[in-house]
Amino acid sequence: MPTADRKLGVAVLGVGWCASQHIAAFLCNRHTAVTWLCAREADRARANLAKYGVTLPDARITTTYDDVLSAPDVDIVSIATPNHLHADQAVAAAEAGKHLLLEKPTGLDVGELVRIRDAVRRAGVRTIVSFELRYNPFLGFARWLRSAGWLGDIRFARTQYLSRVTDWYSGWSWVRTRESGRSHLLAAGCHAVDALRWCSGLEPTSVSAFHTHVTDGYEWPTSIVANMTLEGSALGHVTSSTGFMLPYTFVVELMGERATLRQDLLQWLDAPVDLGRLAAANPFPDVRLAAAADSAGRPAIRIVCTMPDSADVTEHPFQAEIDELVACVLEDRETSISVFEAQHTMEVCLAADRSAELGGEPISLPLI
Ligand SMILES: NC(=O)c1ccc[n+]([C@@H]2O[C@H](COP(=O)([O-])OP(=O)(O)OC[C@H]3O[C@@H](n4cnc5c(N)ncnc54)[C@H](OP(=O)(O)O)[C@@H]3O)[C@@H](O)[C@H]2O)c1
């Protein structure tokens, strides 16, 4: 536990692109100090720190995970390694009594999800999973709009993750493989599945999916469409791809019985949504609302804020995620994206992949 002169010690495992942002965020949190880095090669870890502009003179570098697990100056382990390593590393960290920041995907199959869940439950450590888009103001606003009743009951929810990931990506050598990347949804599109669950507030009850192989170089199909039944007789849809020829695009649409949010445009048919009342109720200081019109000139409300429109991790809201984990460790309470919560998103991804492998056969949820 930190005292006036002792911060929470953090070890970062896997010193690549994503880890650079974990490190930067932990350095900005006044309760944490990055004490250890664990990498395959110390020189490459140093080179990666330099490449990503991170200065960390006081951290020890080890190539042996056990050094981290047995270190008394490690309270939190941050796991940013390739996907197939997450489960074993997370279980070992929990068994060593370390709190966890775990990159998505948490586990690559049901067995891995269960092992992570059980180890964390037994150890009673705090965990947060990097579905950090939940801290993007647009996603937060969309969720609030729905939960505060402005849309009415949700009839249909749709999210899209459209990107083009090829050899520009630092993790290309491992992500493209079945062994480590495993599938499009596990490697990337799980963000869209998570946004659908989180923004709609509705759990998928079954999923039917189709996938296809668009982008060369991958061992797995790079595009998937997944139709879902959601609790409460609602429907859901996710389109997700690493093969689209357009700038990175992340879309959230929530269609309710009163009004519909289509990305940054709010529209209605019958009773108009009152801009003044909505603006007065809006709890997000970084979200502005403006009178607008759609392309046909019909009235709408435009949501103006930082949108989830970049694949670059330097623009992702890791700071808020890491600040929440640290606060929860200090105050001994659960985070909002624990491994238990993230497990539901991972189960939907696994069910969609299973359905696509079976040519669209519906798979019931939950899997576990
Ligand atoms: N939440 C998000 O928005 C987000 C965004 C990007 C990535 N991620 C996740 O973060 C994790 C890391 O991705 P990244 O983009 O940072 O990838 P990356 O740049 O390739 O970094 C991965 C790091 O893990 C190390 N590593 C350890 N064991 C390895 C092994 N057996 N094979 C290959 N590398 C190994 C690599 O070391 P070397 O330096 O020795 O190669 C590298 O430093 C992934 O799980 C990914 O899904 C999440």
Image (tube, rainbow, N blue to C red):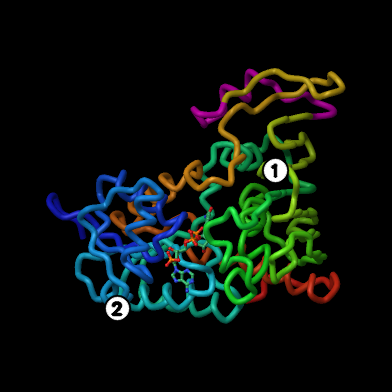
The image quadrant that residue 332 belongs to is: bottom left
Q: Which residues are magenta?
A: 268-287
Which residue is painted at 55% across and 75% down in the image?
113
Percent coordinates x, y for residue 138 in the rendering: 59, 37
Residue 60 inside the magenta-drawn segment: no
Residue found farthest to the left:
5
Foreground pick, 247 / 326: 247
Which residue is painted at 58% across and 46% down in the image?
311
What element does badge 2 sit on?
helix
In the picture shown, does residue 236 fall above or below 141?
below
* Main secondary structure along the magenta-highlighted residues: loop
Is the CB of the residue bearing disc 1 within 8 angstroms of ligand 1?
no
Q: Alpha-carbon neighbours of circle 1 within 10 Å: few (<14), some, or many (≥20)?
A: many
Q: Which residue is mark 2?
A: 66
Q: Which residue is mark 1?
A: 251
Percent coordinates x, y for residue 17 in the rendering: 46, 54
Residue 277 inside the magenta-drawn segment: yes
What element does badge 1 sit on?
strand
**Residue type, label 1:** Val
The N terminus lies in which quarter of the figure? bottom left
